[in-house]
Image (cartoon, coloured by chain):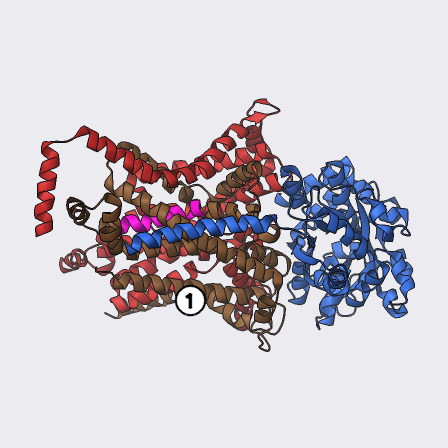
Chain colours: A blue, B red, C brown
Amino acid sequence: MKQTHGLKTLMGTSVVVVGAMGMSHAMAAGQITFVSQGGAYQEAQTVAILDPVAEALGITIHQESAPDAWPMIRTQGTTGQAVWDVVDTPPLNCVRGGNQELIEPLDFSRVPNAESMPEEYKTPYSVAYEFYSSVLAYNPDAFDGNPPETWEDFWNVEEFPGNRALRNHPLGTLEAALLADGVAAEELYPLDVDRAFEKLEELKPHISTWWTSGGQSAQLLYDGEVDMLMMWNGRVSAIMDEGANADFTYNEGILQNTHLCIIKGAPNLDTAIEFVNAAIDPQYQANLPLHIDYGPGNPAAFDTGKIPDERARELPSYPDNAERQVLMSYEWWSSSEGEQAERRWLEFMQQ
Amino acid sequence: MKATAIHDRYAAGSAIDPSLRHRRREHVLMLLLMSPAVLVVFALLLVPLSWLIVQSVYADGAFSLEHYQRIFTEGIYWNTFYLTFRISVIVTLLALLMGYPIAYAASILPKRWAMLILALVILPFWTSVLVRAYAWLILLQRSGVVNQTLMASGITDEPLALMHNELGTIIATVHILLPFMVLPLYATMQKIPQDLVQAGSSLGGSPLHVFMRVFFPLSLSGVMAGMTLVFVLCLGFYITPELVGGGRTVMASMLVSRNIQLYSDWGAASAVSVVLLICVLIIFYVVSRLVPLEKILGAK
Amino acid sequence: MTKLSLGRFVFIGYVVLVLLFLILPVLIVLPMSFSDSRFLSFPPSSFSFRWYEAFFGSPGWMAAARTSLIVAFATALIATPIGVAAAYAINCSTHRLMRYLKIVLLLPLIVPIIIVATGVFFIYALSGMLYTIPGLIMADVMLALPYVITAVTAGLHGFDQTQEMVARSLGMNRFRSFMTVTLPQIMPSVVTGAIFAFIQALDETMVALFISGGQNQTLTVRMFTALRDEIDPTIAAISTLLTATSFALVMLMVMARQRSPA
C-alpha cells in the first residue's frame, strides 16, 4: 500500500517537474541572452558594459560564450529555435548570417547611438562593438633580446626556434601567411588562398598547437607551452598583468573588430534592440579600454574624456598603432571566395 | 516449503489446463509493461536512425550514393576514418596490456586487496570525462608534472610534446576506457576456479606454464568482451580528442558534428554516421556469436 | 625461488604503476581546485577558495547546476518506473518478440553516442524540443533505461517468482502483489538502477552538447565550453564537487546492496 502511494507520488512529481520547466522556458521579459567569446575579454566587458547596461535598462543579461559563434547561429536560425538574442561576433558572421536569414536586420531607427558612427562601422545587420588585433605574441625569455618582429620571423624556424601556435581558424591566419610570404599589406585582398595555404603547409610541422579559443591561447603562452603565437592583443596584455613572461608587437597585426547582431527570431527581440543601442553608448563604450586593451567600437567614446591619453595610445585602433597593422576585409571573407577558403581549412588541418 | 508446494500446485494446474486466453492476456500485459520504454527508444533512437540512413543515400532529392562515394574518395574522410581506427586499435591494445594484469591481480589477491584495486578502478569511472580531460591538461602540458618529472630524472633534456596531439588523445582515452576493460576481465577471471589452477601446478607445471595453459584460455571471453567494449566506445569518441587533440586529431565523431554544425551538411554527416554504425554493429554481431551481448554490455 | 619473487616483484610494481595512472589524474584535481592562480601550473603556488567562490557566486554556473540537477532527478524519477516495468516484463515473458525488444532497449548503449546525439538533435529540431528541459529529460531517460533495466533484471533473477504467485493466489491483484511482495525484495537493485540513471543524466555531455543551450544549458555543457574557452580552475572546483557527489551516491548504492539479503 505504502509503496503504491509512493510510486504514484513519484510519477506525479515528475510530471509536475517537467511541466514546470516547460513553463519557465516560455517566460521571458526584461532579459536577454548575450553571447561573447569568453575569458578575459568577456570579464572585462561584463564590468565595463554589460553590468552598467543591465542596471540602466533594468534587465537581466544571461551570458554565454562561444569562440566561434557561427555553428550555433546556423543551428538556431535554420531550426527556427533561437535561444540566443545578441551575439558579439566578427561582422562576417552577421553579414552572411543576415544574407542567409539567420540574423535579424538591425532597425537603426531604434539604435540612435549608432547615428554618429562612421558608415563603415555598420552593416544592415550589425553595428561595431569593439576593435582588437591578432598580433604576434611571444615569451621574451625564449629569445634573449631578439624576439620575432614580423610574420616572416614567425615562419623562420631556423633563426627563431621554439614552439609555435596559431589559431585553428583561417580568419587572420591566412593573412599572416601571405604577409610572411612577402605580400605587401596594401595588396593583401583579395587573398591568394592557394599561396596562403602553401605557406601554411610549410610551417605546419612546427606548429605545436592549433588553439580554438582566446582563453586557450592565453593559457598556452602563460604556461610556457609555446614560445610564440598569434593571439588577440587584449589576451596578451591580460596575462602580462597577471605577471606572465609575455610580450607582443602591433607590427603586422591583423586589425579586426566584432559587431553586435541579433539572432533571427530571438526570444527577446525588443529588449535585444534596446540592449544593442545601450551597449554602443559612448559612455559605456569608453569603459571598455579601462579594463582590457581593446578599442571602443563607437569612436565617440574618445570624446567622453574617460579614456586617458596614455591608455588610448595602447589600443590597437590608435592611429599610430593602426598604421603598423592590416585592416581585415570582412567584405572579402563574406564573399563566396572567403567561404570557400574557410571550408578548405578543415581539409588543411587533417593532412 | 509452503511456497514451493503452492508453486507446484500452481505450475501443475497451468500445465494441465494451459488456458490459451490466459497466456495471450499475459503476453499483452507484458508488452504493455514494455511499451513505455520501447516507445522512448523508438521515438528518440530508431526513428532518427532510419531517417539518417535515408538521408545518407539522398542528394538533391534523388537516390544517390554520392555521400558514400565522397567518404571513399575524398582525402579528408578517408584520413579521418584511418585515424579513428588507428587510435582505437592502439587504445584497445594499451588498455588490454594495462588492464589484464590489474584484473588478474584483483582476482588472485585476498578479498581486501581485490576490493582496494577495484575501488581504484571504479573511482575514475565515476569521474566526469570532462574532469579527466582537465586533469590530463595539467599533467601533460609542456611545463606539466610529467615533463618536470621526466626532466628532473634526466630521462629527457627537452620537454616532450605530450598534449594537444594524437599522443595526448591516446593517453587520455586509455585512461577513460581502462575501467571498461578491467571490469569484464575481472568478472570472468573471478569465476575461474582456483583449484583448477592449483591442480595445474600440482601436476608440476611452472607458474608461467600454468598461467598460459590453464588460466589465460579461460579468461579469453573476458578479453573479448573488454576489447570489444573499449574498441567500440573509442570509435565514437568525441570529447577527449576535441579537448586535448590540439585541433588536428579529427576523429569520425568530430567529422559528423562539424558537418552538421558548421555546414548543415546532413547528407555527409549521415553517411559518416551510417558507416560508423555499420562497423559497430558488425563488431557486436561477430563478438556476440562468441560472448553473450549482456556480458559485454554488463560493465558499461 | 628468487626468480619467482623477482617476477612477482616486477608484476606488483607494474600493477601499482597502472593503478597510479588510473588514480593520479582524479586526485590532482583536488589541490588544483584550491589554487590561487587562474592557470594550470601545478603544484599551485598558493591556496584559496577563489574557484569555489567563482562557482557558487556565478549566476551562470548556478543556473547550469540547477538545470543539471532538475534533469538528473526527473530522469531518475521517470526512467526508474519505466525501466522496472520493462525489466519485469523481460523477466516474466518468454515470448520471442521479447528477445528482440530487449535488444532494442540495449541499443542506446550500442549505438555510438555521437549518432544518438545527431538523431535526437534532428527529432528535436523538427518538434521544437531543442534547448528545452523536457527534451533533455527524455533524451536522458532513453540513455538511462539500459542501466535501470540491467540492474533490475539482475535483481529479479535472484528473486523467487513463486512468492508473488503465492500473493496472487491469496487474492491480491497482480499490481498489488508486485508492490507488496516483489518490489520490497528487489528494492536494492531498483535503487541501484535509479542512482545509475541519476549519475548518467548528471554526467551526460555529448547529447547535451547538441540539445541544451541558452538558459537550459547543463553543467557538463558549460564545463565543456569552459574547458575549451577558459581552462581556469573553476572546473577543478566543480569537478571536486561532482566527484564527491558521484562517490557519495556509489557508497549509498553499496550500502543498499549490503543491506539486501544476499
Chain under callout 1: C
Which residue appears at 19% of the width and 48% of the height? C164
Q: Which residues are magenta?
A: C141-155
Residue A246 in sight: no
Please indicate whether residue B56 sits to the left or right of residue C78 in the image: right
Q: What is the number of callouts on the image?
A: 1
On screen, B205 above or below A263?
below
Quarter holding the N terminus of chain A is bottom left
Q: Amino acid at mark 1?
A: Leu
Residue C70 in sight: yes
Q: Is residue A314 magenta?
A: no
Name the residue nearer the viewer: C94 or A198.
C94
Please indicate whether residue B42 sits to the left or right of residue A283 in the image: left
- The residue labelled by disc 1 is C20
Main secondary structure along the magenta-highlighted residues: helix
Which residue appears at 74% of the width and 65% of the height? A47
Q: Is residue C151 magenta?
A: yes
Label 1, residues with CA under 10 Å away: few <14, some 14-19, many ≥20: some
